[in-house]
Structures are given as structure tokens and as C-alpha cells.
Amino acid sequence: MVVKTRKSNAKEQSSEKDRSPSVSVKSRRGKDGKSSAIQSKNGLFSELIRNKLGLSPSAFARGVTVLILAVIVGFLHWYHLSHLFENDRHFSHMSSLEKEMAFRTEMGLYYSYFKTIIKAPSFMSGLYMIMNDRLTEYPLEINTLKRFNVYPEVFLASCYRVYSSSMDFFGIPTKMCWTINRGEGLEPVESCEGLGDPAYFYVTFVFLLNGAMMSLFFIYGTFLSGSRLGGTATVLCFFFNHGESTRVMWTPPLRESFSYPFLVLQMLLVTYILRTKNPSRNTMMALVISNIFFMLPWQFAQFILLTQVASLFASYILGYLSPAKMQSLLVTHMISLAVCFLLMFGNSMLLTSFYASSLVSIWGVIALRDHFVGTFKPGLFTWIMQCLTWVVSTVILKFMLSVILGASDDAHINSLIKSKFTNYKDFDTMMYTCAAEFDFIEADTLFRYIKTLLLPVNVLIVGFIAGRTIRDVMFLRNGETNKCEDDETEQTQVMANGVLVYHSLQLVAFAVLAVLIMRLKLFLTPHMCIMSCLICSRQLFGWIGQKFKLQIIVVAILSMMAIQGVANLQSQWGIIGEFSNLPQEELLEWIKDNSSLNAVFAGAMPTMASVKLSTSRAIVNHPHYEDAGLRERTKMVYAMYSRKPAEEVKRNLIKLQVDYFILEDSWCTRRSKPGCSMPEIWDVEDTQNAGKVPLCTLMSKDSRPHFSTVFNNSIYKVLRVPKIVKDIR
């Protein structure tokens, strides 16, 4: 019965299948076929990702997410910068002359070379003009590519010429212009907006570049912390401390605006190299390129790279960096330095820098590591001897190269450092130290760090890293190094810890620079934002427990940061201004209308940059104060603000072949702090005339008989230098 029943059931099932419509069978088979086809395609896609990129599909998806978020934060930062810049100056409603006047001091000097190239008949003729320039330090002919780090202007000028010619060819309008009624009896001006306007094109590129920098910050924070929340924390900290992190929204043409984004890329690559056991040649080449793009636009880059090399060397001494990897990093720096030296037409400041000497001395210390180990017992004493050898050999080599090459352009930097620790003063040093940005860091800055919790969070993170470092160092000193090298897991852990140690040492180096020179907080603050991402690091805070618990704590910390951070942003958004400088506009218009094209001007450095930019007249001094010869020329010009006799000052101006001196009363009386008015600065060196009435005061009242006044308004007075200058030329 049972068997029959089973057979019966089988027959019934068979008959049911036979009765089922054939269409239904085909439908089911079609669905199965599509499903298998989709699975096959997914399998091929996954295989392609694994073979080509070496990533699992989930890792690829996370990477795409990171890139999308990076683009979003980059766009937000670009919009933020553009919004602040427009609010501050109403840039879109300014005339071409007003836009140029807005680029004060050295900004105007750099922008003038961009203007020279785009106004030239061809790109090559413009390039020739700035490489054989006689307007900047008349009557000298200088190569501005060698002296002023103006490769960004060359690149932007070439882009602008290509863009303009392309749009003209296709008949596409590139700007909108309208007439602006300024009121108060002033003549209307034409204002243009759009990429066809040179100044608009220039600042738009700068803001786009710094928007891309924020994308790099997000990627950097994500990579360093191992969490997208870490990247978010980095970006939020940057925005919450935006006023302390950058000044690109106020001063777009400054060198740091072009250079710093490439430092972020360079440090990200260094982080990747430190985490990788055997970095590829392409990675090292990318580091070389990022080094070059960081050094070329900014003369100060070499000092920042010096701190990086020092931090890496300290990591090597502590045992976190192998000799082979350290030497590989040194080679990339040496290649970058050599390329920049060639592109800067043999600028001696690069070869005679502490950075260049440091690369050579560290290479020597590593080459002699076996002698150190054989001579001294491993431990603290060996570390100290290696550091002393590095410092002493670097200093000796630097001064030897300076003597051999006859370079003294960076002597003022040594004097500036000396003045920070002693009572040393001279004219050039006080020109720096009397400016607020070159003074010691303000206490208010530290309070602002505390209010946004940026400083407390960094102290906490560095404290944990220091504790782990002490444990690692004791571990390595106890003879476990060979065991670490045999155990791949332990070696990976040491490399991971080494990354944290390097970033902590770099933070300390930036902190020292910022304390000594307030302007350099623009390196400290962003690096503190990067370090803040480590509050999300499981490597440091895995002991808290589950990942979800750590994320809740991080969100709570970010929420507390946002209390002051959002207030800071609202304060920035509340800045509403409008640029106007009628006295300088009157001066520049007078120069264009009443002086010959061959006229030569002298005066305050910021004003000279504007004169060169807007009138194309020759000047004898300018704001780029890094050249020894220029410092001497400026000192001769600034004798007008000393207590020297008028006849002596006139002889100096005649020697410099000056036709007109632009006198500013504010420079005679302005005093940023006690002892910092121009007459007081001169009293440091010109003691024999101390106590006399400043010459600028006398000239403000009556310039005769030594000079004649040819223009005068509420701010500026133009003095004609006697015609005897023509006989000397």
C-alpha cells in the first residue's frame, strides 16, 4: 500500500507537470537565464576590480564613496572662499583698477607678472619680458622666474590666453560688463564679471585649487584614521577654525595659496609610504612631483620641508623607519631640490639652505650607522650623538656652501631667529619683527584653539601616541628588533605606530614655528585638524570597545566643537565690506597721466607694487624682501623716514636714478608697537642722528629746496628728484 501510494503520488506529480502550460516553463527558464547573466556580469566586474585595482568590491565601493564625499567638501570649501572674498570686497562690482589696487603689497607684485604675459603680443614675448625685467629693480635687469617664484603666474597666464583665444574663436562671451555708479561726485566705472576678466580668472583658479585642497584633507583624514568619520572630523575642524587655518580668502595671490595644497598632497603620500612595506617607484615619483609643486611657488617651502626631514629622521632614530626607506625618502627630496634648482635658474638660496645641507648630513649619519652602533652602546646616548652629528654637520655645511657660492640672501632669516632669543636688533630684523604676523603667537590664538576643543583633542591624541611610543621604544631596546622583522604582523604594527609618531613630531615642529612666528600658524592649525581625525582611530582608541561606541563619542566631541565652530563661521559670514581707496586711485591716475613711460619711482614697498602693476612704471624697490641687494636698496629709499640730512637722502635717490619719490605721512608716524615707527627703527642703526626731527616730517611741511612737490592729496605726496639724476645715467 505504501509503495503504491508513493507511485500514485509520483504519477500525480508527473501528470501535474504535464498539465502545466508550456509558456510558464519558458518564463521560469527566462528568469533563471537573466539572473545567471547578471551574476555572471557581476562576477566579471568583481574580477576586473580585483585584477586591475587589487580591491574587493566592498573596498571599491568604500573608495568611490570617499571620492564622492571628497568632491562635495571640496565644492563647499570653494564656495565658502568665493563667498567670503566677494562679501569682503564686492569684487564683482569693482573696476579693473580697483581690483588691481585690492592686490596690495607683494600680491600686486606677483599679479603684475600675470598681467604682463596676458597683455604681451604673444605668450613667448611675455615670458621673455618677465625673464628680462627692468621695471622691478630699475636699472637692474632681473629674471623674475629666478627671483620671485612666479611659475603659478606663468601657468595661469598661459591658461588664460588659451581660454580667451578659444572662446573668441567660437564666439562665446566670457564676461559681462556694466557701468557702476559710485556716487559722491565720482565718475562711473566699468565693472566686469566672468572668466574673461583677468582678475576674476586669477582668483577663481586660486579658490578652485584650495577647494581641491579640502578634498585632499578629507581623503587624508580618512586614510590616516581608517574611517570616513575621521575624514569628516578633519574637514569640520578646519571649517570650525577657518580663520586660523588659512587666509587665502583675503589674500589670493600670496605664494602659500598656490603652494600649500601640494604640501597636503605631499604629506598624504609620505603617510602612504610610511605605511607601505615596499612603496612602488610610481609612488616615489609622485612624491617627487608633489615636492616640486610645493617648492616652486614659494620661497619658504624649504623651511617646511626641513621640519619634515627632521621629523622623519627622528622617527628613524627611534626605530620606526628602516635605513633603506629613510634613504629612499632622502633621494626623492634631493631629486626634487635639484629639479627646482634648475627650474629656478640656479637660485643659490636653494643650495645654501639648511634644508639642502640637512639632506646631505642625514644621509651621512645613516651611512655611518654601523660605526655609531660599534662605538656607542645602543640607547639614549647613541640617539643624542646622531642628532648632534646631524645638527653640527648641517650648520657647517650650510655656511661652507654660503661662503663658496657667495650667497647672503637668507642672512636676514638667521638674524630674525637670533632676535627671537636675544636682544639683537638691526634695521632688516625690525622690519620683520615690528609686523604682527612675524611676532610671537598671540595668547588669543591659543584661547580660540581651546574654545573649539582643537587644542585639548590634540593634546589627548599626542599624549596617547607618546605613551605608545615609550612602550615601543622599550620593546625595541630590549633586543626584540629581530623578532619584529621576522614577524610580519609585528612589523606592520611598528610601521603603523611609526606613522603616528611622525605626525606627532611634525605637529611639534609646526608648533615651534608658530610660537616663534605667528604667521606660521597657517601650518600648525591645519595639521592639528589632520591630527584630530585620530579620535576615530581604532588603532589608538580600540580599547573603548565596539566601533559603535567610539563613533558615538566622536559625534559627541564634534557636537561640542560645533558650538564655538558654528559661531566662528557665522562671524566670517557676517563680514560685509566694500573696497575703496580713492587717494591711491588719484595717485595712480596722476602717474599715468602726468609722468613719462620711462619715469622711475621709489617709496614704501606696498605702494611700489601697486605703481608697477597699475601704471607699468619702473620702480627701484618692492615688497619681496628676501634678496640681499633689494634689502640694501630699500634701506636707501627708506632713509626718507629717518633723521638723516635731506642732502644725504637726495644723493641716495639720485644714485638709484629715481625721478619721483612717493611720500606717505602715515609711514612717518605709524607705530604698530613701542619702538616700531620708522624713525625709531632707524634710531637703532643711525644713532648719531637720534633725537632730530624725522626728515619725512620736514618734507611733509615743505619739500624745498631739495625736492619739489608735484602731487599732493590726503595720503600721498609725490616729490620730484632734481634733474641732476639725468646726468648720472
Image: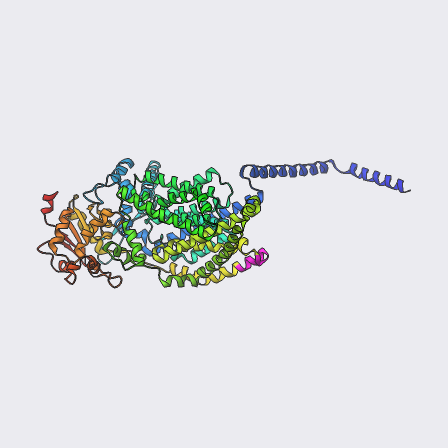
Please state which of residues 212 and 20 is positioned toward the viewer in this rendering: 212
Q: Nearer the viewer, residue 329 or 70?
A: 329
Determine if the magenta segment contains residue 546: yes
- The answer to whether residue 403 is visible is yes
394 lies left or right of 215: left
**Residue in the image at 35% along x and 39% along y:** 338
Q: Is residue 145 left or right of residue 689?
A: right
> In the figure, 421 relative to 198: above or below?
below
Magenta part, dominant SS: helix
Say which quadrant the C terminus sits in: top left
Colouring convention used in this rendered image of the protein: rainbow
Q: Identify which residue, 139 or 300, lies in the foreground.
A: 300
Q: Determine the residue located farthest toward the front in the rendered image.
A: 375
Q: Residue furthest left?
A: 705
Picture coordinates of residue 328 (x, y %)? 44, 41
Quarter of image, res 569:
bottom left
Residues 210 and 223: in front is 223
Q: Residue furthest right?
A: 1
Residue 21 appears at what percent x and percent y? 75, 37
Q: Which residues are magenta?
A: 543-553
Question: Looking at the figure, which quarter contains the N terminus?
Answer: top right
Q: Kindly indicate the quadrant of the structure image that contains residue 525.
A: bottom left
With 539 as the anchor, is 685 left or right in this view? left
The total of numbered circles placed on residues is 0
Residue 640 in the magenta stretch? The answer is no
> x and y percent of residue 106 in the render?
28, 50
Note whether residue 716 is visible: no
